[in-house]
Image (cartoon, rainbow, N blue to C red):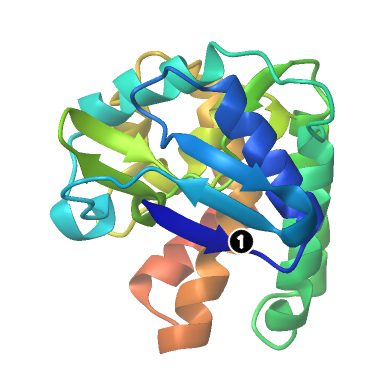
């Protein structure tokens, strides 16, 4: 088992609520116990537990995984996707200064909020990237959700904007999703996907491609 501690009890509350809503889904880590007031979650161990960011993955694994998560409606108290979008852009704003034009950040935020405003009550992971999916005995298992309620296509962004992947090919590899929605989310969130590499390594062909994708919004 794994003890997870978080100083933000609201994060613990929503994570525990989402994990309990997904109880019985073998693609999600089991919560054994929770003490929200102490910011503590006791989670089942996952073996071998190698992140897909290290192990590698096949697109069909993700196209099978995501609809299973999204088939569960968000329980009461889970924030809407619009809140998650605002939070992500607020956290990114200090790192964007000097790296990304302010108007590009503003256009990306506006586009993301417009997409997030569409009705939907699917339970989303909210932070679903290859490092948050571990190899389990019977297939991939997700961990560390930042749950929200809304458009399932949001959870595809980190899978279609990875280095070395052609966007059209990546979108086509997720046939369970509306390709126009996946493309729209990719354009809207590409600027955030570029910030991490820009901070760590500076400009590259990859970051230039992401910023060019987001520039179509302005």
Measured from the top left, where is residue 28 in percent x and y?
41, 32
Residue 59 in view of the camera: no
Query: Which SS class for mark 1?
Result: helix
Query: Residue 175, relative to residue 198: is it above or below?
Result: above
Q: Which residue is mark 1?
A: 191
At 74% across and 49% down in the image, what residue appears?
36
The residue lying at 41 percent from left, 56 percent from top is: 2
- As drawn, 111 above or below 103: above
- Residue at x 70% of width, y 20% of height: 74
In the picture provided, is 87 more to the left or to the right than 63?
A: right
Residue 160 x, y percent position in the rendering: 39, 42
Q: In this view of the protein, which residue sits in the foreground, 173 or 77?
A: 77
Q: Is residue 187 visible?
A: yes
Residue 94, placed above or below residue 177: below
Residue 180, percent across and down? 54, 22
Q: Is residue 200 left or right of residue 163?
A: right
x and y percent of residue 188 in the render? 65, 46
Categorize mark 1 by other alpha carbons within 10 Å: few (<14), some (14-19), many (20+).
many
């Amino acid at each position: 088992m794994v003890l997870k501690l978080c100083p933000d009890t609201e994060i613990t509350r929503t994570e525990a609520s989402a994990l309990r809503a997904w109880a019985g889904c073998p693609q999600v880590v089991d919560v054994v116990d929770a003490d929200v007031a102490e910011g503590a979650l006791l989670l089942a161990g996952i073996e071998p537990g190698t992140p897909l960011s290290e192990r590698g993955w096949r697109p069909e694994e993700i196209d099978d995984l995501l609809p299973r998560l999204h088939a569960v409606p968000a329980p009461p108290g889970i924030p809407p996707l619009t809140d998650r979008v605002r939070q992500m852009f607020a956290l990114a704003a200090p790192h964007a200064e000097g790296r990304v034009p302010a108007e590009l950040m503003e256009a990306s935020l506006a586009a993301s909020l417009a997409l997030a405003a569409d009705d939907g009550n699917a339970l989303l992971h909210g932070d679903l990237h290859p490092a948050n999916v571990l190899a389990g005995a019977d297939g991939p298992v997700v961990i560390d959700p930042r749950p929200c309620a809304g458009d399932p296509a949001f959870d595809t962004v980190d899978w279609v904007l990875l280095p070395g992947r052609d966007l059209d090919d990546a979108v086509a590899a997720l046939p369970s999703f509306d390709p126009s929605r996946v493309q729209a989310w990719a354009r809207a969130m590409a600027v955030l996907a570029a910030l991490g590499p820009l901070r760590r390594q500076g400009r590259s062909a990859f970051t230039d491609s992401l910023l060019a994708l987001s520039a179509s919004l302005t």
